[in-house]
Image (cartoon, rainbow, N blue to C red):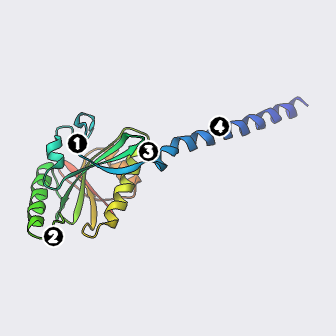
Amino acid sequence: MIKKKFNTRIKARYRKNKQIIKKEINNFFDWIKGAELIILNECNTSEDPVRPELNNEFRNSYGRKIYGVRYKGKICAVMCFGFTNEIPKTVKELDLMTKDAFLKSVLRDQKIGQIAIAYTIWSKKKGGGKLIVKEVFKMIKKSNHLNRLVTLSPLTEMARNFHLHNGAIELQVNKETQNFEYKI
């Protein structure tokens, strides 16, 4: 009899905890539904864990852009891009290739580069990194001149795991960086 009473209590507690966990998970992901991708004029570069040495002028010149995920007026994740026609192996190459693509676009159709190079990403809210990757992926898919999404990532296991877990394939490992590609 005691065993039966004990089992009933365990089952009741299990059901209650299951409801609480389900509610918490729903609350956790509610913010993602209301978030939107926006273009930023600047970001707080000291928050950038990957490339804090790059100032806002670099991030916004020669066709480079800063994208953010905004939720309730706050920026939850940031991703910076350069647009090129080749895949850079260093930040210096990224600088030169984005300038080249930008200058060529001035003479043609104003569409800068065919490859979007993500060179830094960070999140202030759980799930923000994955969300911004998905949103930028959708934006690039809709564009009619971008046909590749490639990263210029640091040589860290964390960067490698992040990109592989989010569906990218490893293109190459360089001396200072590594490149991953998200299939469009």
Disc 2 residue crowd, few under 14, some 14–19, many 20+, Cα 10 Å: few
Q: Please rate how many residues cluster around mark 1, counting C-alpha atoms within 10 Å: few if below 14, some from 14 to 19, many from 20.
A: some
Label of residue 127 in the image? 3
Q: Can you identify the residue that label 4 sits on?
A: 20
Under circle 4, the secondary element is helix
Q: Earlier in the sequence, mark 1 or mark 4?
A: 4
Q: Mark 3 or mark 2, which is nearer to you?
A: 2
Query: What's the residue at 22%, 63% (across, down)?
Result: 115
Q: Quadrant of the C terminus?
A: bottom left
Q: Are marks 1 and 4 in contact (CB under 8 Å)?
A: no
Looking at marks 4 and 3 on the same chain, the residue that comes earlier in the sequence is marked by 4
Tell me the number on the disc at residue 22.
none
Q: Disc 1 or disc 4, which is closer to the eye?
A: 1
The disc labelled 1 sits on which kind of residue? Glu
Residue 104 percent across, percent down from the top left: 9, 66
Contact between marks 3 and 2 (CB within 8 A): the answer is no
Marking on residue 42: 1
Q: Of tags 3 and 1, which is closer to the observer?
A: 1
Residue 117 spot, x, y in % from top left: 23, 56
* Mark 2 or mark 4, earlier in chain: 4
Residue 85, above or below 74: below
Indicate the position of residue 111 as horizontal and vertical percent values.
Answer: 18, 66
Name the foreground residue: 58 vs 35: 35
Tag 4: amino acid = Ile
Q: Residue lying at the far top in this picture: please name it.
A: 2
